Amino acid sequence: MDRRVFAHRGEFALRQVGSESILVPIRNHVGDLDSVYVFTDVAARIWTLLDGNRDVDSIVTVICDEYEADAGVVRTDLAELLGSLEAADLIGAAIEAKS
């Protein structure tokens, strides 16, 4: 079980531009193209679920249900995405949910 809970760090706007989802910081580095991120549809959905309330297990469940995906694949891909978002300082651990 993965009971970790993540939340966004800072203020961001997630916008749909054509077929892509673009994450743009609202305050710092707004003109810095290195601070603009392009997400897949699934990554954009995960971003909305990183609300400081849902744990990783519940996010896996939502993605599996909505995209009819295999839980093992979702868990692996989610771990990779979370690592990338943490490395870019876009998210941080909010709390560890109690079991």
Image: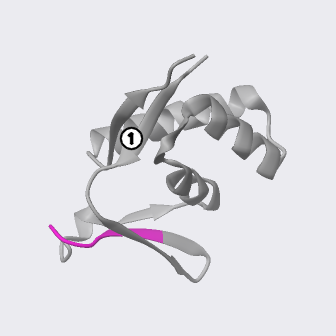
> Toward the viewer: 81 or 59?
59
> Toward the viewer: 89 or 11?
11
On the image, the x and y values in percent for residue 13 come to 39, 72
Left or right side of 81 for 59: right
Rendered view: 97 above or below 87: above
On the image, the x and y values in percent for residue 7 come to 39, 45
Q: Say whether residue 87 is magenta.
A: no
The C terminus, quarter of image: top right
Q: Name the residue: 73% across, 37% down.
A: 61
> Toward the viewer: 67 or 4?
4
Mark 1 Cα shell of 10 Å, populated few (<14), some (14-19), many (≥20): few
Q: Amino acid at mark 1?
A: Ser
Figure quadrant of residue 73: top right
Rendered view: 70 above or below 44: above
Figure quadrant of residue 31: bottom left
The residue range painted magenta reads: 22-28
On the image, the x and y values in percent for residue 16 come to 54, 78
The N terminus, quarter of image: top right
Which element type, helix, strand or loop, lies under badge 1?
A: helix
Figure disc tally:
1
Q: Which residue is mark 1?
A: 84
Q: Name the residue: 49% across, 25% down.
A: 97
Rendered view: 50 above or below 73: below
On the image, the x and y values in percent for residue 46 come to 57, 50
